[in-house]
Amino acid sequence: MPEMPEVQAHAERLTDRYAGDVLDRFRPLAFTALKTATPAPESAQGHPLVDVGRRGKHLLLRFEPVTFVVHLMQGGRLKEDAKQAAKPRGGQARWSFSDGRALLLTEAGTERKAGVWVVAGDPGGQAPLDHLGPEADSLDRDTVAELLTAHSMRLHGWLRDQRILAGLGRRLANEICHRAKLSPFGTTAKLDAEAVDRLHAAMGACIEESLAYERTRDDMSSSADRPGAVHHREKEACPVCGDTVRAVEYRSYTVNYCPTCQTGGKVLADNTTSRFLK
Ligand SMILES: [Zn+2]
């Protein structure tokens, strides 16, 4: 799933390419795509795109009267629609501009979870953004410490919980735990001051490096392209210590870690005995 760096760089690209373009028409192409009934998306027609912003993993297409909040979820993409076919493959919604160009929201697969919300006024306090915690790259060290104490849980889950802090997902949770030399299964409230220092520094560094990489691209990377030390690298050598990267698989995600760097050499569970723990 695209996380904060991928979505942020994509928002910047879309702003560069489309800001100022006047919306001719917004059209949902799948009946599940538009998640709101009011305000009507037509209220943006005839207005220029102010810019494309980001909150958490959501893109915000800002027009003067309303904002389109787009969540790409796992397989969603928002791209230039060169063909403008009547029934594009995976097509969810289309924004057509008066200069003849269009943006197409597509979603691969059959999950149909990607969606568009139309909101008036400040989108921050409204669905689907109203439950989001602060941006993960906006937190100072002491705020991170407070949030760790306030939400006692496994560190990997804490990093991914959008209500606690917004923008991180499975890949960055794996990379941040590795960079900080912390077990993904450690309990947040038990981290000592030095561990919190390392975690805070790792969050900033991993987000910044991913964002720098994404900004070099013409389009959003696929997960296989994204730089990293452990995510989806099980059985490979840890670039820091040379130990073998391990995996613990859950139903919808995989935790990758290096035993030497993160768990005092302890192999927590292999991916056959721990498969589908929850
Ligand atoms: Zn290592």
Image (cartoon, rainbow, N blue to C red):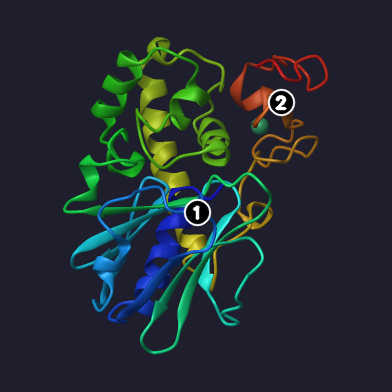
In the rendered structure, the answer to whether residue 153 lies left or right of residue 141 reads right
* Residue at 57% over, 32% down: 178
Q: Decide: is 231 above or below 180.
A: below
Mark 1 Cα within 10 Å, few/some/many (few <14, many 20+)? some
Q: Decide: is 158 above or below 40.
A: above
Mark 2 Cα within 10 Å, few/some/many (few <14, many 20+)? many
In the rendered structure, the answer to whether residue 123 lies left or right of residue 161 reads left
Q: Which residue is mark 2?
A: 249
Query: Is residue 183 in view?
Result: yes
Q: Which residue is mark 1?
A: 210
Task: Tell me the distance, in whole angstroms, between the alpha carbons under discs 1 and 2.
Answer: 24 Å
Ligand 1 falls in which quarter? Answer: top right
- Image spot of residue 87 (x, y percent): 63, 70
The answer to which quarter of the image holds residue 118 is bottom left
Q: Decide: is 98 above or below 260.
A: below
1 or 2: tag closer to the N-terminus:
1
- Image spot of residue 94 (x, y percent): 47, 69
In the rendered structure, the answer to whether residue 163 lies left or right of residue 233 reads left
- Image spot of residue 120 (x, y percent): 20, 54
